[in-house]
Image: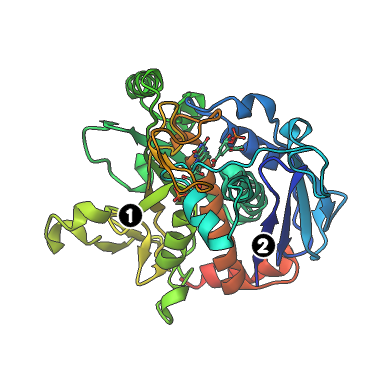
Amino acid sequence: MFRFLTAGESHGPCLTMIVEGLPAGLTVEKAIVDADLHRRQGGYGRGGRMKIEKDAIRFLAGVRHGKTLGSPVTMQIENLDWVNWNERMSAAPVEAEIDPVTRVRPGHADFTGSVKYSHDDVRNVIERSSSRETASRVAVGGLCRQYLAQFGIEIHSHVLSVANVTYETERALTADAYSVEMWSAVEQSPMRCADATLTEKMIARILEAKREGDTCGGVFEVVATGLPIGLGTFSQWDRRLSARLGMAMMSIPSVKGMEIGSGFAATRTTGSHVHDVLRHNEQGKWSHLTNNAGGIEGGISNGEPIVVRVGVKPIPTLARSLPSVDLATGENTDESRYERSDVCVVPAAGVVGEAMMAIVLTEALIEKFGGDSIEETLRNYHSFVQQY
Ligand SMILES: Cc1cc2nc3c(=O)[nH]c(=O)nc-3n(C[C@H](O)[C@H](O)[C@H](O)COP(=O)(O)O)c2cc1C
Ligand SMILES: C=C(O[C@@H]1CC(C(=O)O)=C[C@@H](OP(=O)(O)O)[C@H]1O)C(=O)O
């Protein structure tokens, strides 16, 4: 069984992750995890906090001489901003008078979290509801990426739209639609978008929102290639790979929708245009002529790329802030609170989406192939894939 937990406040000293269930003997490199953390910090539209943080992990447990031990892997990321917050975030009571935050931001967890936990200082909610926590998931995903590489599985993401700036035509979802060159263009783009003209338009749209004190959302796509047939199952509702990816993607703060393969577009046409015809070639390999299913049929991977598209709402914290209510007085106010904030996080959210995909696929592979050491898992994997 694979599972993980994360802990840490946004402006506390650090983020901590415990990952259980990775097999022993897996080579894990800090540099690969750090590269993912670095990618999550980027993307045009990020705010002042990202100039302070330089996310990197420290292994605290479970890894020796570059390989997993089979015991829980513990990692830590330092919050460099903590030095500016240590009195406000002190675990011990402090002498100083610290003004509570009392005006809630529409669209954030401020209102629901304060009512639920009976907090009269919204700061107590902001700290853990903040998407700072997504750095922890990217670190866990960075370990999973290295596990998946053992099976030839790769995961990438790219941005399809920001506000109303979007690709004009539907794109094929088959393996040939995603090339090494395309992913390299994505990594060069400040918007993580393969199309240079669209990148410029997206940046212009974000700048326009910023000038108006506003924010924007958009859509990113995550693609996993090199998958075996047989991950996930229809046997119970919560074991379907599609359902597990849905939960994983929807758990990313600010995500409001997800589709698999051709998704909602498939609802606007007929079956003969949607279902992917299966072929068996002379080498005995299975393939589909199209990939509208996005690599999953009956809750099980079918060997084609898994393709999911994820919708991100605009960031809740607006420089031109929206009307609010002061929780201390119950008064309706013209403005909620504004501190520094991101304006658009669609590229960063895509990197978090990659991590969530890596986590779900790792869990599904471990479930299917087991193995207490990576050698044992690989033996099981090869014996299964050779038989189809
Ligand atoms: C990488 C990332 C960075 C974010 N940065 C901000 C931010 O700077 N300001 C903000 O108000 N919301 C930000 N958000 C979105 C909020 O965290 C999110 O909207 C909030 O937690 C409420 O959750 P919900 O939108 O899922 O309801 C960010 C989201 C992500 C994924
Ligand atoms: C810290 C991160 O994102 C933060 C997510 C976030 C929010 O409200 O979700 C608010 C901002 O935090 P701060 O108020 O400290 O500027 C973002 O910077 C990060 O992505 O690492």
Quadrant field for ligand 2 = top right
**Quadrant position of the N terminus in the picture:** bottom right
The residue type indicated by label 2 comes to Phe
**In terms of image quadrants, where is residue 58?**
top right
Residue 94 as seen in the image, left or right of residue 158? right
Mark number displayed over residue 4: 2
Of helix, strand and loop, which one carries label 1?
strand
Residue 359 as seen in the image, left or right of residue 203? right
Looking at the picture, how far across and down is residue 219, in whole percent? 36, 41
Closer to the camera, 340 or 269? 340
Give the color scheme: rainbow, by chain, secondary structure or one colour.
rainbow
Residue at image point 68% right, 47% down: 9
Residue placed under numbered mark 1 in the picture: 259
Q: Residues within 10 Å of mark 2 (few under 14, many from 20)?
A: some
Lower sequence index among marks 2 and 1: 2
Q: Is mark 2 within 8 Å of ligand 1?
A: no
**Quadrant position of the C terminus in the picture:** bottom left
Of helix, strand and loop, which one carries label 2?
strand
Closer to the camera, 152 or 99? 99
Residue at image point 37% right, 51% down: 256
